[in-house]
Amino acid sequence: RQAPGCTRVPLSTSPFIAMLALLASGSTALTVGVAPSTARSTRAVSQPAMSSSDRCAVWVVGCGVPKRGMGWYHAKQVIEGDVPNAAVTAVVEPWFLGAGADSPPGKAFAEWAEAMEEKGVAFCDSVDAVPVAEGERTLALISGRTAD
């Protein structure tokens, strides 16, 4: 049985998703464990449906190349529902929306960006350009290489 105000995630959940689930849910505690045998096996956080006012907007800053960058992978996790009460609302990628746009990885990024824009994700070349929703909880997920 789960305590009120607690978010439960399966043991197989990555530490990143567990941390993001806790932040996005507004819970005061995080329980990691095995779901009861009657429950379906899933990586998603097990909790009631959230209203749009309980949602946490996620900005991915430094996304990187689709299928290669960790920022891209974390964006994919959130977009695919691994954190049900979080939504990627913006991706900030100065290189692939600037000088690197014409490179082969930049073209792959542009294809992915076009598909994600259809899902309501804004793509910006700087944090200052990200549209901010008044009163919305927001988490900036900063992903970059050590050299950056």
Image: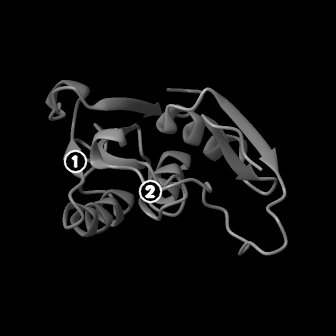
Left or right side of 51 for 124: left
Residue 20 visible to an observer of this rendering: yes
Dot 1 or dot 2: first in sequence order is 2
- The quarter holding residue 37 reads bottom right
Report, in whole angstroms, how far the alpha carbon at label 1 lies from the one at label 2: 27 Å
The disc placed on residue 49 is 2
Determine crowd level at label 2: few under 14, some 14-19, many 20+ residues with C-alpha closer than 10 A.
Answer: few
Q: Position of residue 62 (x, y in %)?
A: 41, 38
The residue shown at (28%, 48%) is 52
Residue 143 visible to an observer of this rendering: no
- The quarter holding residue 138 reads top left
User: In front here: 8 or 126?
Assistant: 8
* Element at label 1: strand
Q: Position of residue 42 (x, y in %)?
A: 68, 68
* Element at label 2: loop
Residue depth check, mark 1 versus mark 2: number of the one nearer the observer = 2
What residue is pinned by disc 1?
123
With respect to residue 13, does 133 lie above or below?
above
The disc placed on residue 20 is none
Q: How is the image coloured?
A: one colour
Left or right side of 3 for 102: left
The residue shown at (62%, 56%) is 46
Amino acid type, callout 1: Phe
Q: Position of residue 115 (x, y in %)?
A: 26, 69
Amino acid type, callout 2: Ala
User: In front here: 138 or 117?
Assistant: 138
The residue shown at (82%, 53%) is 11
With respect to residue 101, does 58 lie above or below?
above
Q: Position of residue 27 (x, y in %)?
A: 57, 32
- The quarter holding residue 60 reads top left
The residue shown at (50%, 31%) is 26
